[in-house]
Image (cartoon, rainbow, N blue to C red):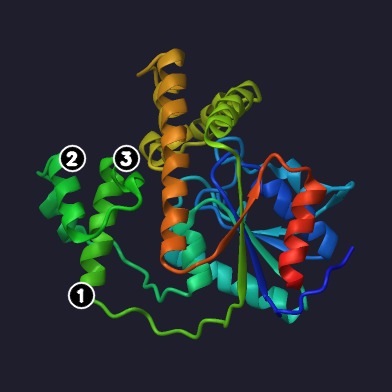
Amino acid sequence: MKTSNPQGYNLITILGPTAGGKTSVAANLASHIGAEIISGDSRQVYRKMDLGTGKDIDDYTVNGKLVPYHLIDLFEPGYKFNVYAYQTQFVKVFNDLLSRNVLPVLCGGSGLYIEAAIQGYRLIEVPENRQLRDDLASKSHGELERMLASMKKMHNHSDTDTRKRLLRAIEIEVYYADADPASFEYPTIKNIIFGVRFPRLQQRERITQRLRQRLSEGMIDEVENILADGVDPENLIYYGLEYKWITKHVLGEISYDVMFEGLNTAIHQFAKRQMTWFRRMERNGLTINWIDGNLPMDSKLNYIYDKLQA
């Protein structure tokens, strides 16, 4: 099925909090209109990190046919991917799809990455500053948190999860203070945004249910295998959430029950931060057309079609 696009959108974005069903909606939409999906997730670029990042690869198969997707499984675990690298990769895929007359569907829950893509922020690649890191070596975690908070408004508190993340965030802010954004030609994007969400209590239930399911499917084994491949535990903990808590459990630092409760709470907090980010996007002038996750798939798609044709 094809649907008309009289407004001439060259990008459809589908976002939402974790465990909200956005991937299924994006895949079904892409299947019906002949589009391809660009992942808007900060961790799905890593190979072997499947359950922990919620890739939901099965969702990309619709009516027995795989919907093409991009920016998934690009790098090995341990690689330090960032928003600059993501934006560079996004532009490359976006331009390629348009050159083939294929409509891109951007799908994900990483608000910073999605905003960087659709708003065309001019970003710069930040090299490691060894002198700065040496100067900060004696500072406590709390001192580093306060230092970072004095440099920028803290929308994404995952920057404070580990010392390594804190140091990198400070390094970026120091570099940005002394450098001009890179000048590069960014494509003109005409974008329409849809969000998929459930009522709050139902969303919480879905998160916990999904965590139990992923653990039963082998998420601990996934972490053990990555560590067995030689990835440093600190590098895996750097990715936060599932990889932080499960790595600590695998290393024997915490029990299974402590791991589960801590991780479950952390994911709920993460979903809350995602919604806070999306609401900030709306306050800053971006329209998000919200879709009730409880609607049947046909109703969700019809809502999108109606908006495209308006």
Is residue 81 visible in the rendered image? The answer is: no
The mark found on residue 161 in the picture is 3
Q: Which residue is mark 1?
A: 178
User: Label 1, label 3: how many angstroms apart (C-alpha)?
Assistant: 26 Å
Q: Residue at x 76, y 49 (%)?
A: 60
Identified by mark 1, the residue type is: Asp
Above or below residue 158? Residue 190 is below
Image quadrant assignment for residue 239? top left
- Please state which of residues 40 and 45 is positioned toward the viewer in this rendering: 40
Q: The residue under label 2 is which amino acid type? A: His
Q: How many marks?
A: 3
What's the CA distance linking mark 2 and mark 3?
A: 10 Å
Residue 247 visible at all: yes
Sequence-first disc among 1 and 3: 3
Residue topped by disc 2: 141
Callouts 1 and 3 close, C-beta under 8 Å: no
Q: Quadrant of residue 214?
A: top right
> Is 157 situated left or right of 265 in this image?
left
> Which residue lies at the image location 21% right of the left edge and 71% below the top edge?
177
Dot 3 amino acid type: Asp
SS at badge 3? loop
Instruction: State the image coordinates of residue 159 (x, y, percent, origin top left).
Output: 32, 48
Badge 1 or badge 2: first in the primary sequence: 2
Q: Secondary structure at mark 1?
A: loop
Is disc 1 surrounded by few (<14), some (14 to 19) or many (20+) residues within 10 Å? few
Foreground residue, 40 or 229? 40
**Mark 3, residues whose alpha carbon is within 10 Å: few (<14), some, or many (≥20)?**
some
Distance of mark 1 from mark 2, alpha carbons? 24 Å
Quadrant in which the C terminus is drawn = bottom right
Which residue is depicted at the point 42% across and 49% down? 276
